[in-house]
Image (cartoon, rainbow, N blue to C red):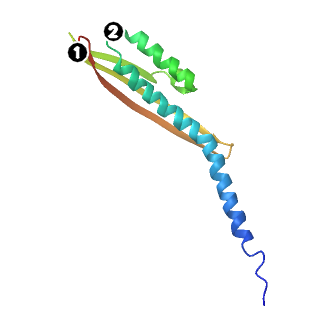
Amino acid sequence: MRQQRGEGKVGCIITLLILGVITAAAIKAVPVYYGDSELVDACDFIASGASKKPIETLEREVKDKARELGVVEALTDKGAIRITKTGGGDAGICTITLHYKRTINFYDVYKFTRTIDKRITKPIFENIS
């Protein structure tokens, strides 16, 4: 009878190598995607409560959240964060626009640039009883 020992080693090594590469890439990419998602969610929440706040306060809140999440590109790029409030009387619309780019550096082997271009629009109701 022939011995069958060792024939599965090459496949196992290749599988472990692929899993290692995927894990290393995820370690770099997941925090960037998570930070961007959290910033969009925070902007959604900030826009919902924009009724009595001036635009400068809203902008400061968004920048504070971006700083907390480590989204430095949103703070340094000119025009990365734009906030507008339209309407008059008791109702209106608050719009927060995020437009910036983040680069994910995969261990100096590959660089991926991710563009975030989100527009969050929420109605403003001032006199709800």
Q: Kindly indicate the quadrant of the structure image that contains residue 10.
A: bottom right
How crowded pointer 2 is (Cα within 10 Å; few <14, some 14-19, many 20+) is rated as few
Secondary structure category for the residue under label 1: strand
In the figure, is residue 24 to the left or right of 102? right
Looking at this view, name the residue that lies furthest to the bottom: 1
> Is tag 2's residue or tag 1's residue first in the polypeptide sequence?
2
Q: Position of residue 47 (x, y in %)?
A: 36, 21
How crowded pointer 1 is (Cα within 10 Å; few <14, some 14-19, many 20+) is rated as some
**Residue tagged 2:** 52
Tell me the quarter of the image containing the N terminus. Answer: bottom right
Residue name at image x 50 percent, y 18 percent: 63
Q: Position of residue 21 (x, y in %)?
A: 66, 52
Residue name at image x 35 percent, y 27 percent: 120
Name the foreground residue: 8 vs 32. Answer: 8
In the figure, is residue 102 to the left or right of 118? right
Secondary structure category for the residue under label 2: loop
Q: Position of residue 53 (x, y in %)?
A: 37, 9
Q: Kindly indicate the quadrant of the structure image that contains residue 31.
A: top right
Vertical comparison of 36 with 90: above or below: below
Label ID, residue 91: 1
Q: CA distance from mark 2 to mark 1?
A: 11 Å
Residue type highlighted by circle 1? Ala
Tell me the quarter of the image containing the C terminus. Answer: top left
Name the foreground residue: 65 vs 111. Answer: 65
Residue type highlighted by circle 2? Lys
Q: Position of residue 81 (x, y in %)?
A: 44, 22
